[in-house]
Structure formats: structure tokens, C-alpha cells
Image: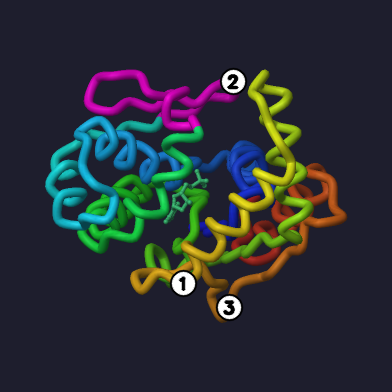
Amino acid sequence: MIAIDGPAGTGKSSVSRRVAAALGANYIDTGAMYRVATLRALRAGVALDDPEAIDKATEGVRISVTNDAEKQVVLMDDDDVSDEIRRDEVTRAVSAVSAVPAVRARLVQAQRDQAQTGLSVLEGRDIGTVVFPDAELKVYLTATPEARAQRRHEQNIAAGMDSDYQTVLADVIRRDHLDSTRSTSPLRPADDAVQVDTTDLGIEEVIAKLVELARNRIGVEA
Ligand code: DC
């Protein structure tokens, strides 16, 4: 089990996907699961400050996240929501939904079930602290808020979306605050996590570092 945690904009998704491919491991994007729960709550029209309503609205939703080398396909029940879960509306609401303990309990269970067979790379916020506290390798990726906002801003532009750097930076800071101060599973490095600051590292360098760590720690061939 390899846990990769950290805030948004550290390159965590691209790095986790590529590290999993290099190791022949399963890749599990837990953020995508929280995004589906959020979309479900938004579609149900529940108030985001009503944890009980969020719990009810998201109970029983079937979430499927599959990845191949080219594309990630995310299903909510049988609906393809791969693009919709990346929209701003979902990104803005996800901290509220992922702070609800009942939602977290269900998704943590689903994550544990999915990682039952073979080597898995799980990417999220609480993998090393809560989901798999016994993971063989725990990595915590960091970068300055400015570097993370700059990356998100460039991704938005590349995706053809309108983007304003200052707005993106404010959102990065707001989400960091919400994610790290919530009472259930706040975002924080596990005591035994290897912290990697990606501010001045290219993605290839980060991948190489993690693959090497995995080789040394758990003896997997890559
Ligand atoms: O990695 P991401 O931006 O797609 O994650 C979306 C949100 O989901 C993020 O703001 C925090 C939440 N999340 C969480 O609370 N726990 C996880 N294991 C993964 C994501």
C-alpha cells in the first residue's frame, strides 16, 4: 500500500497516476469519490450547511472510478460524470460535503475494499493518517500556495477555462484552511510520512523520487 497525501495543486494526481503505472499498481483517486458525493448533494439541492441532509442525499450512491493510461472515467450510479465533477461548482462545495463524518465513513470503507488485492497507490488527504495508517510507504506532497495556484491556473487555461490567478490563489488558501481545520480527518502529514516539497521540482523528478522510495521501502520492481 502506498499512500500519497497533500493539498491540492502539488501535482499529486499526475504523480500518483504515473507512480502507480510505473509500479504496475492499482491507482485509487479518493478525491474523485468525494467529488461524486458532492455532485450528488448538489443535484439533490440540499443545503451545504446541513450535514444530515448531505448524509441522506449521498447514502446509497454508487461510485465507480476507473483509470486507463489515457483517461479516467467516473460514474455516479450509471451516469458518466467525469467532466462534471471537475467543475468549479463542485470544487467549491466539496469541502463541506467531505467534512460530514457519515460521508467519510462510507467512502473510507469503499477505499479499503477497493485496495484489497495487489499493490495499490491511494491518493487523497487522509490515506496515511486514517484510511491506511499501516501503509508501507506514506508520502506527503507539499508546495507553496503560490506555486500550487499557478499550476491550477495554468491547468485551467490549458483546459480552455476562464481563469484568474488571484481568484485561484484565494480558493487554494480557502480550501487548505477548510481541509486542515475540519474536525474529522483533517489534512495533515502522518508522523511517519516522507514529506516532499514540489515547489521547485518538475513532475518527472517527483515521480523518480517516489518510485525510488517505493523500491527501497517495499522492494517492488519498477
Ligand atoms: O484531490 P481533489 O481536489 O480532487 O479532492 C477534492 C476534495 O475532496 C478536497 O478538497 C478534499 C476532499 N478529499 C478528502 O477530504 N479526503 C480525501 N481522501 C480526498 C479528498
Q: Is residue 58 left or right of residue 36?
A: left
Residue 134 image point, x, y percent: 44, 71
Which one is closest to the eye, mark 1 or mark 3? Answer: 1
Q: Residue at position x 25%, y 39% from top?
A: 41
Residue 181 circle label? 1
Residue 11 circle label? none
Residue wearing tag 2: 70
Residue 192 circle label? 3
Quadrant of the frame with the C terminus: top right
Amino acid at the residue labelled 3: Asp
Cα separation, mark 3 vs mark 2, equals 33 Å
Q: Residue at position x 47%, y 23% from top?
A: 83
Residue 211 image point, x, y percent: 71, 52
Disc 1 residue crowd, few under 14, some 14–19, many 20+, Cα 10 Å = some
Q: Is residue 57 left or right of residue 200?
A: left
Task: Assign a secondary structure to mark 3.
Answer: loop
Q: Is mark 1 within 8 Å of ligand 1?
A: no
Task: Assign a secondary structure to mark 1.
Answer: helix
**Residue contact between numbered discs 3 and 2, judged by CB atoms under 8 Å:** no
Whether the magenta-drawn stretch holds residue 28 is answered as no
**Residues in magenta, as a range:** 66-87
Q: Earlier in the sequence, mark 1 or mark 3?
A: 1
Q: Is residue 87 visible?
A: yes
Residue 80 image point, x, y percent: 35, 19
